């Protein structure tokens, strides 16, 4: 199976007759409510416990109101717990930019549908990297907005202190149009002036990936008045990732526990393993991770004042091959999370832009700014195109 | 779904033209190899890693050679890890003696097929109670033989130091005929003479179940020269059960680990949780449990010399309703295991006989003897009928 859409009756809901997105089509990850259609959540036993929604999720309604037409719901990793996009129940959506390789997840179907040109944009969610990673692997624009900025009504929760709604597009122009609607803010004409190149993050990437991103970094730098190198995470990106891998599973386990106990759902083994291990994290570890989160947020505020942005590789390598064993995937997943955990930990916005390749496979460059700088990051992505 | 058989092409393999079981039909739990048919193991991703078997399992071949005809493979709890018989992938086989209630597991389909009169006997496996529990819940004769007595070639392993091949029948006569073939020993005419009533085990059962079994206990006692009350497990049946719940998950986790890592299979949540928790049991806990196993075996040898048998409730209550949440099932499962763990822990044989009911639902009385007393237990079951 390689279709990016979840099985079921064909779904098409026309957008408003006029509006800033009139003429565009979009898809929504199967974590967003669409009235009259069950929200599947990527798991065969998720919908069983929930009534069919009677209202559209906020983001779906927002796009419809702006004139975009919904053309389908897309495959997600099970209950958004996955970063690679392999779902043994719904199938692994095709990555048209890297056939034979994973699309990335958990917003796998949304990225795949946009990359396959089956729609112009698509809604995803990003808790630990679920928009940024598939954007990188599929060669798309993708955004994880500032945490808390968008209304998440009707979006299935995972770890609420990190959950965000994001979106994808193939080109910067469409990306900016959709971003204006969902952010509710014009994309500015004035760009930030200072760039920080995160040397620690480039050090986590494969050398080939770091090298492949250099032309994009140089073009980005050329748009700025000032460029300097610095570390993103002084204690180590792996230390921040460890804090986030304490907080996020603790929260997701609280989110899903009533369902697990009541329904005893079918799941792929490693998702169930993750939830089981998450349930065993001690209060002591959580307290430590909460303190680390405070310090990481302070670091971001100090490093990224208004007018300053930072760049890093979105992922440390391009899309891995499909069907690798867990013993190979687990360390790869750990390296990916080392580059993505700052998002869920600190809540800052991040845009991944396409434009680089390693052995013919896409890999994205990410631009990060301080909280609330979402529109500025989209402006940079547009200027870079 | 309530069929006891696994999906797939109809399966029928005629037995030898003559033999002690000529004219009988049998089914085999989907953990036994049947040449030319994949062994499904109750999980949609088990067969993927194994070639289709080219030889019948030893027990299947033994029954065919004795003249019995194979009429199907039966549903099992996932990779034999379950005691209730609810399989969300293959379905929960009907318990015709208790509709709306579970059949018991993991040999759920084998018990159901015999109880539904779709065959005369059926092969199951019993590591932690997987023949005894469905025999009790479905109102059948069922045996867990002495550990190590039968050739387990072609039977999927779970925890090898506790795994056994068992079987079911509706009547004592058929049960004895099949037992003679699989044990390779005549059922004796002379019965044991001494009965121990396990007061600790009756104390673990619901009072209604203990009371319902009293007529059977009295009939059993009437066959003996001498009856006395004693405890089965001086340290506590729950202490023995805890030792077995250390040893068995440690072993099953070693058995399945390569598959989990390579295939990342779909599983119901609580099976994956059990395997994950099993992987975290420390060497220190295992050493303690191994010592407990030595002492439990010595207790059994001292308590049950040749000529002495023991009786206990097979299960503490009849079949629970289908579809209960994990929070309700987990403590029920714990109580069942308190009455079954001595089997896997000490390796003694046990026969469950039908004949009692609680609120119209069957519940079995079990007869236990020292190692190697299998045929004597079958003789007692026959005399009791």
Image (cartoon, coloured by chain):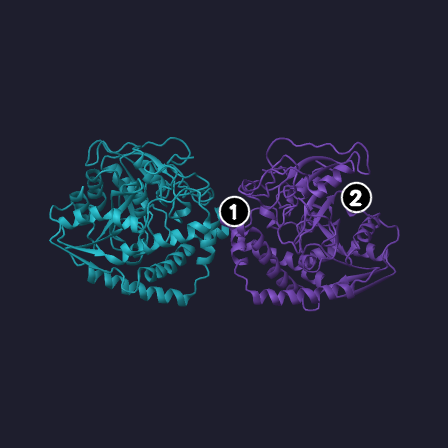
Chain colours: A cyan, B purple
The answer to whether marks 1 and 2 sit on the same chain is yes
Image label count: 2
Pick the front one: A40 or A306: A306
Whichever of callouts 1 and 2 sits on the residue coming sooner in the sequence is 2
> Circle 1 sits on which residue?
B267
Kindly state the secondary structure of the residue where label 1 is placed: strand
Residue A360 versus residue B207 in the image, above or below: above
Q: Is residue A312 visible?
A: yes
What chain letter is assigned to the residue under label 2? B
> Circle 2 sits on which residue?
B181
Q: Position of residue A31 (x, y in %)?
A: 37, 44
Q: Position of residue A8 (x, y in %)?
A: 42, 33
Q: Residue at x 51, y 56 (%)?
A: B276
Q: Which mark is residue A42?
A: none
Q: Viewed as shown, does residue A141 lie left or right of B162?
A: left
* Image quarter in which the N terminus of chain B is found: top right
Q: Quadrant location of residue A286?
A: bottom left
Pick the front one: B52 or B179: B52
Q: Quadrant location of residue B207?
A: bottom right
Q: Viewed as shown, does residue B68 lie left or right of B4?
A: right
Cα gap from disc 1 to disc 2, whole angstroms: 36 Å
Callout 2 crowding tier (Cα within 10 Å): few <14, some 14–19, many ≥20: some
Pick the front one: B382 or B68: B68
Q: Position of residue B201 (x, y in %)?
A: 71, 61
Q: Viewed as shown, does residue B378 lie left or right of A98?
A: right
Q: Viewed as shown, does residue B77 lie left or right of B375?
A: left
């Amino acid at each position: 199976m390689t279709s990016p859409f979840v099985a079921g009756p064909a779904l098409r809901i026309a957008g408003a007759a006029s509006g800033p997105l009139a003429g565009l089509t979009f898809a929504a990850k199967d974590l967003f409510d669409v009235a009259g259609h069950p929200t599947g959540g990527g798991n065969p036993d998720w919908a069983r416990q929930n009534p069919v929604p009677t209202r559209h999720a906020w983001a779906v309604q927002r796009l419809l109101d702006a004139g975009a037409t919904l053309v389908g719901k897309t495959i997600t990793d099970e209950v958004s717990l996955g970063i690679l996009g392999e779902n043994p129940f719904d199938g692994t959506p095709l990555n048209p930019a890297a056939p034979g390789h994973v699309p990335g997840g958990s917003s796998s179907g949304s990225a795949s549908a946009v990359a396959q040109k089956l729609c112009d944009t698509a809604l995803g969610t990003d808790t630990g990297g679920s928009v940024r990673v598939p954007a990188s692997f599929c060669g798309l624009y993708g955004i994880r907005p500032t945490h808390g900025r968008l209304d998440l009504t009707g979006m299935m929760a995972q770890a609420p202190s990190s959950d965000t709604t994001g979106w994808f597009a193939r080109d910067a122009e469409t990306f900016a149009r959709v971003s204006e609607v969902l952010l509710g803010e014009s994309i500015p004409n004035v760009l930030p002036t200072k760039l920080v190149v995160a040397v620690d993050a480039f050090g986590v990437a494969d050398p080939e990936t770091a090298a492949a991103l250099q032309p994009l970094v140089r073009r980005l730098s050329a748009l700025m008045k000032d460029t300097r190198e610095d570390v993103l995470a002084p204690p180590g990106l792996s230390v921040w990732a460890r804090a986030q891998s304490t907080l996020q599973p603790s929260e997701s386990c609280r989110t899903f526990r009533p369902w697990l106990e009541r329904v005893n759902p079918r799941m792929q083994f490693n998702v169930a393993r993750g939830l089981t291990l998450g349930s065993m994290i001690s209060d002591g570890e959580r307290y430590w991770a909460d303190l680390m989160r405070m310090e990481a947020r302070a670091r971001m505020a100090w490093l990224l004042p208004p007018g300053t942005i930072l760049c890093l590789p979105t992922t440390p390598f391009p899309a891995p091959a499909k069907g690798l064993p867990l013993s190979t995937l687990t360390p790869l997943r750990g390296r990916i999370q080392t580059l993505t955990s700052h998002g869920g930990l600190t809540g800052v916005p991040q845009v991944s832009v396409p434009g680089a390749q390693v052995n013919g496979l896409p890999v994205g460059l990410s631009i990060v700014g301080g909280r609330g700088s979402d529109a500025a990051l989209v402006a940079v992505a547009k200027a870079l195109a």
